[in-house]
Amino acid sequence: MSVPELSVVVPVFNERDNVAPLVDEIVAALRGRIAFEIVYVDDHSSDDSLAVLKALQARVPELRVLHHVTQSGQSTAVRNGVKAARGAWIATLDGDGQNDPADIPKLLDARAQADAGTKLFAGWRVNRQDSGSKRWASKAANAIRRRLLRDDTPDTGCGIKLFEREAFLDLPYFDHMHRYLPALMQRAGWKTVSVPVNHRARGAGVSKYNNLNRALVGIADLRGVAWLIRRAKRTAVQELSND
């Protein structure tokens, strides 16, 4: 089996009606353009998302399916998908279908125009299709995060991102880390770019988050990431020859 250039990692929990349409859109966006694989990580869904994924493998050879034996959250699902991925670069999408796979080529084009020091291309939802309360909460959270972390990123909550696998796996891991990838990449010495992308209303299912639980978790996370940034140490490393 040939090694793909790109691995598309999709964490999913109870999204059985969104699985097949999203897989088909990923295939339509990438097949014939780049060698790719799709790595779905089922976070111990209580519906039949896993059965739907297994059935799809019969007609989508690029599809791989991982399953958490206990529910572990989105960040763990993303990280386990990246660890299992065979591509040197990773694209992520939320499993609810609100990210548009047709934007993945746009992120690839942005990578082609960037220098080698840029390791993350983050989607920026310029036309959010969420409820008013969710948009307001996200705007407030982004403002607080940008002021505290100084990551110069307008939208870290967008699920569609493109990043180098090796750089990602070198980042400190913690629950909810997927919301802070620009700041963590910059902490590691890499540059990041925000790319405007499409955003769609949820077609089926229900959101797994609400504004209150996002806020409560976010306060602790922001303090933790700010601490990591303050304690970061970087230096170039030289290997000496034995001549």
Image (spheres, rainbow, N blue to C red):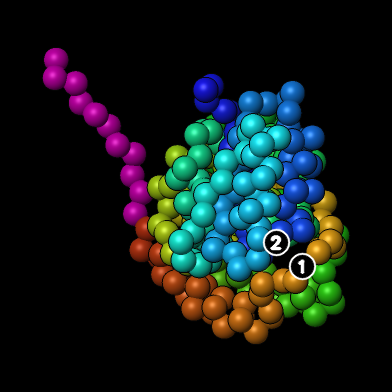
Closest to the observer: 115 or 170? 170
Residue that label 2 marks: 15
Placement of 20 over or under 238, stated as above or below:
below
Q: Residue at x 61, y 81 (%)?
A: 213
Give SS at disc 1.
Answer: loop
Q: Is residue 182 among what the camera can see?
A: no
On the image, the x and y values in percent for residue 236 come to 34, 39
Label located before the other in sequence (1 or 2): 2
On the image, the x and y values in percent for residue 206 come to 75, 71
Residue that label 1 marks: 205
Give SS at disc 2.
Answer: loop
On the image, the x and y values in percent for residue 112 come to 67, 29
Q: Which mark is residue 242?
A: none
User: How many neighbours does mark 1 have within 10 angstroms: few (below 14), some (14-19), or many (20 or more)?
Assistant: few
Quarter occupied by residue 143? bottom right
| Quadrant housing the C terminus | top left
Quarter occupied by residue 146? bottom right
Q: Say which amino acid is labelled 2.
A: Glu
Magenta region includes residue 16: no
Closest to the observer: 153 or 90? 90
Q: Mark 1 and 2 residues: CB-CB less than 8 Å, in contact?
A: yes
Closest to the observer: 96 or 114? 96
User: Which residues fall within the magenta stretch?
Assistant: 233-243
